[in-house]
Image: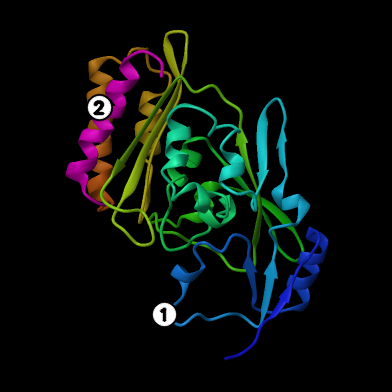
Amino acid sequence: MNLSEIHYPHNLQELTLLLEHERNVQIIAGGTTFGYVQASRYLSFEPSIAYIRHIPELISIHKTERMISFGAACTLSELEHVYPFEQGQAKELMHTIGTSAVRNIATIGGHLMYGKRFLTLWALLACLDAELEFKAILKTSTKNIWYLADERGVPAIGSGNLLTRIRIPLQSIDHLFIKRVGGSMFPEGDGAYLVSAATVDRRSIANFKLVVAGARAYRDYDAEQRIISSPYPLPARILQNALRMYAESLRKSNFWNVELLLPLISQALENLQRSNT
């Protein structure tokens, strides 16, 4: 068995220098999913390992009037008391991930960069327009969370980039709908989460998003635009047209279990008709 050299960078500068001078560096933070991404039952390590859990820039949480930003090495437990996970259905969703012991170790960066499928929080963060900050050797870039999915909705984790921060706009959410479908989510189950989020401005729908994420990720932008700016509550005609659009796009994309998802999408839209969550 080959022995790996383990590095403990103290800041992002040391880490980026390491990535520049060493090839095939394995990044480890919580490491709770490490065994599941192995090609075989025998653990395989890169020649160099970088343990990043204690880099200050990667474990800090910043909040402004418009946005909250947390480092990719923040544990899930550390995020339980910050937006959007501090209350309601989002808090309950967080608590479905493993046990408290797992959440004390697992990081949000590892959760998003799993690569084999989209895990529990992905659909919610996609509904909230989460932005991801990546650092490569020579540049820093910001991408929408959908950067992690290809045109077929399959996970597309690029190499050579380090996820450093996750930013979520602080926005009012008047209606939040979260449903789990299928079986297990991890490590390679057939489960998925359907999440919809809506904002109502007086008597019209100011914003609406609906995302399904599991083995694949799905979102119909045209159906969302049909709903946005519509009167509130939704007229029956608009609701039926939106359901028809979702049915057509799900079938066209050959998405997983259309017959199961359509009633849930209908339930999410009907939930939008009722009082605020």
Instruction: Report the residue marked by disc 2.
Output: 241
Mark nearer the viewer, 1 or 2: 1
Looking at the image, residue 217 lies above or below residue 233: below
Pick the front one: 174 or 139: 174
Residue at the front extreme of this rendering: 101
Instruction: Report the residue marked by disc 1.
Output: 41
* Secondary structure under the numbered disc 1 in the rendered image: loop
Report x, y in % for residue 54: 73, 57
Looking at the image, residue 134 lies above or below residue 129: below
* Residue at 53% in and 47% down: 145
- Which quadrant would the C terminus be assigned to in this image? top left
Magenta residues, as a range? 256-277
Say few, some or many: other residues with alpha carbon within 10 Å of mark 2 (under 14 / 14 to 19 / 20 or more). Answer: some
The mark total stands at 2
Instruction: Check disc 2 and give the amino acid type.
Output: Asn
Any mark on residue 269, and which?
none
Looking at the image, residue 186 lies above or below residue 250: below
Cα distance in 3D space between marks 1 and 2: 49 Å
Pick the front one: 227 or 129: 129
Say few, some or many: other residues with alpha carbon within 10 Å of mark 1 (under 14 / 14 to 19 / 20 or more). Answer: few
Report x, y in % for residue 273: 31, 16
